[in-house]
Image (cartoon, rainbow, N blue to C red):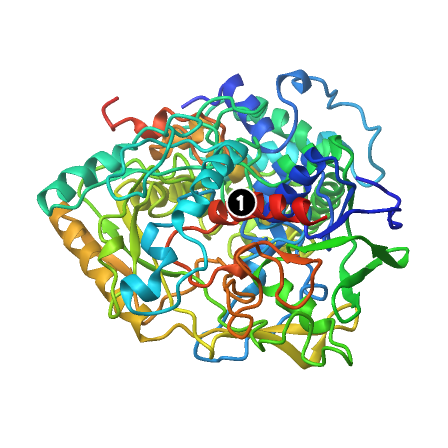
Amino acid sequence: MSADRTPIEDADVCVIGAGPAGALVADRLADAGRRVVVLEAGPRFDPDDRFERSERAIRPAYDLPDVWDGDPERDAHVSSNEDWFYPLNHTRVKGVGGSTLHWQGMVMRLHEDDFDSASERGVGVDWPIDYADLQPYYAEAEREIGVAGADDNPFAPPREEPHPMPAFKPSYSDGLFAEACENVEVAMHSVPNARNSETYDGRSACSGYGTCQPVCPSVAKYDATVHVERAEEKGVTVIDRAPVQYLEHDADSITAAVYATPDGEHRQEADSFVIACGGVETPRLLLLSESEQYPNGLANSSGLVGKFFMDHLFAGMGGTLEEPTRQNHVGFLTSESHQFYDDADEEVGPFKLEFFNYAGPSPVESALGGDDWGDELLERLRREYGTHVGMGALVEQLPREDSYVTLDPDRTDDRGNPVPDVHWNVGERALRTLERANEIQREILEELGAEITWQVGPENTGPAYHHMGTTRMGDDPDESVVNARLRTHDLENCWIVGSSVFPTGGAMNPTLTIAALALRAAEHVDAEL
Amino acid sequence: MELTRRDAVAALATLGVGGAAALGARNWQRDDRSDVVDDELVRNTLVAAAEVVYPSDVSGTATFVETFLEGRLERDDHARGLRETTAEFNDVSEQWHGDEFPALSQADRDRMLREVGADTAEEIPDGTLAERVRYYVVNDLLLALYSSPTGGELVGIENPQGHPGGTDTYQRGPEA
C-alpha cells in the first residue's frame, strides 16, 4: 500500500474498488504486464487487528458495522421503501478486501437454468452467456479462492475437476439431520467453502475460532486481501482511503477518475477503467458522474443503471431436541440440500436448504449479555446451550423495476455527495418460495422430533446481504448496461465487474460467480487495451 | 474445575496476544506503566472480581487472570480504560465500604458490583462507571473464561467461540 496517494503515470487500467472482483481483475492484468492502479474508498486494515475485531464480533458493545470500522457519515444511506427496509451498512465492508472481510465464505456455482430463467422458468430474463461459457472460469475461481468441496452433490451443475481441497467433514448435527432427511426423502450433501480444510496457497487450515462471519482471525477463510497483496507484489499500485467522486468523460470514454484523499483531491487517468464497487456503489458512481452529455448518469442510455436491485431472501426454522446437538463449535456450514433448486418455475423460485452448525446461543456471547454471574450464570448457560437445531434457506427474488438503487438528493455523505437510496422490493414469487422452503424445513424438523421455537418466513424475512442486478448484463443496449464481456454499451473503455451485472440472482451465494466473471472480464479488458 | 496453563494461553490467544511467550513476564509489584493506578491494584481487583463472577467450583483463578491481564495491558487503549475504571471503582468502594474492592469480603464484593450497577448495565467502553465496570471487569473476566476450553467445558462445549480449538470437536458426538 502506498502512503503516497497521488495518481500514477501512464496507467493502462484504473480499477475502482478492492473487493474480490477488483482484486482479481488487478491481479490478472498485472500478470498480463499491464500497469494497474486500484482506488479503494475505505482503508487498508492492519492484519494484526484481526483478534481485536474477532473480540468485537463476540462482545455486545459492538454492532456488526463496528467490527470493520464502519463510518455512519462516510457510509450514510437511505432505505426509502418502508415495507422492505434495507440495512445497507450491515451488508458491506468498505476497505481493502471489501465485503469478503465479513462474508460467510460459501462458494457455489449457479445452476445451468439460472442463466436461462426466462426460457427455462418463464420469468425473469436470460443471461447473454450460459453456464458453459462460465464453467472454465468457475474452475479457475475455485483455484484462486481456494475452495474446500466434494463431488457429492447430485444436483450441482457439471464440473470438470475436483475442488482444490477436500470438503470439511459433516458435523455431528448433520448426522442427526441425515436420518430425518432420509425418512422424508431429502438428500444432503457437502458445502463448498472458501476456507481452508488444509494448508492452501500459503494460508493455514481453519483453526475453529468460530467467528467466521464477520472476521476470521486465522485468515483460513479467503478474503480479497489475498489477491490485493498478490497484485501489489506484481507491481500494482493500491491507493486506500481514496473514494472516487465522479468519472470524467467525453462522449465515448472515461478520461479520469477523480478521487478524494485525506490529502486532497486527485485525478487518475488511464486507458481503461474497471468499476468494481458492488451492487450499490457502482450504480451510485455512474449516477454521480452525470454530465451535459449524459444527464441521467454515465453508461445509462438504457435508463437501467440502478434498476433491478436484487438480494437473496432468508427463510429459516429451528428449535430444540431432547438430546445434545453440539452446536457453535465452528462458524460455518458443512451440509446443504439443493434438491429443490431446479424445481423452480413461474410460481416458485429456486432455493437451497442449509443445515446449521451454530443454532442457538453461543455460550460466551450469552454470558456477556446477561445480568447474572457466578453459579447462577453457569446454570443459565447450561440450560440454554446444547440442544438447539436450525435450518436456513436462500431464496431467489426476481429482478423488478420497483426495486432499485438511486441517489437521494436530500441527504449527502461526508464528502457532500448524495447518498444511495436502496429501495428494495421482492415480489410475490419470492414470498411463495419462502413458504415452500418453510414447508420443507418444518417437515424435516418434525421428523427429527424437534420442538420448533422460531421461524423466519414471508412475514419476517430479511436480506442475505448479496447486492445484485443494478448494472445488468445483456446483448440489447436498450435493455442492459453492460454487454456479455462486461463492457458498458455506452463507453468503450468502461468495464463493470461484480454482482451488479447479474441479470437474475439465482439462489446461490454470489461470490464465486463474481470471481468467475471477473477472471473472464480481465481477459477482455486486456484484449481491448 | 481447574483453570490450567492451557486455558491461560488460550485466553491470551483469544484476547489477541502472542501466547506463551508473554506468560509470567510482568512483575505485578512494579508500577512503571500508569500514572492512574498501579497495576498490582488492577490485578488484585480483577482476581477479586473473578472470585465473584466465576462459578464457585472453578479454581486456579489468580494465575489465569494474571495471564490474560498481561495481554490486556499490552493493548494501550484497553489498558488505559481498564486502569482508569479500576481506579474509579476502587475509589467508590472506599467511599461506600471503607476499603478497596480487593479487601472486601466476597459477599461485599458481589454487593459492590451490583451497587455500582454492573449487573444490569450494558457494556460500553467509554460509558458510565457501571457500563465500564461491566466492560473492563465483569465482561472481560467472563469473556476470558467462557472462550477458554475449561470455561467451555463447564457448559458442554470444548471449542467455544473465540477459541481456536480446531475442526475435530464439531464432528464429535456427546459420548466421544
Amino acid on which the number 1 mark rests in the picture: Ala
B152 relative to A460, above or below: above
Residue carrying label 1: A515
Dividing the picture into quadrants, the one containing residue A379 is top left
**Horizontal arrangement in the rendering, residue A78 relative to residue A39 (left or right):** left
**Horizontal arrangement in the rendering, residue B93 relative to residue A220 (left or right):** right
Dividing the picture into quadrants, the one containing residue A491 is bottom right
Confirm whether residue A106 shows in the render.
yes
Circle 1 sits in a helix, a strand or a loop, which is it? Answer: helix
Kindly give the residue lying farthest to the front in the view shown: A528
A45 relative to A454, above or below: above
Residue A330, image x, y percentages: 41, 35
Q: Nearer the viewer, residue A306 or B30?
A: A306
Q: How many marks?
A: 1
Q: Nearer the viewer, residue B166 or A203?
A: A203
Mark 1 nearby-residue class (10 Å; few <14, some 14–19, many ≥20): many
Q: Residue at x 32, y 39 (%)?
A: A158
Q: Nearer the viewer, residue A17 or A217?
A: A17
Q: Nearer the viewer, residue A136 or A410?
A: A136
Q: Residue at x 19, y 56 (%)?
A: A440
**Horizontal arrangement in the rendering, residue A167 relative to residue A14 (left or right):** left
**Subunit ID for the residue under disc 1:** A
Residue A319, image x, y percentages: 24, 52
Residue A341, image x, y percentages: 27, 53
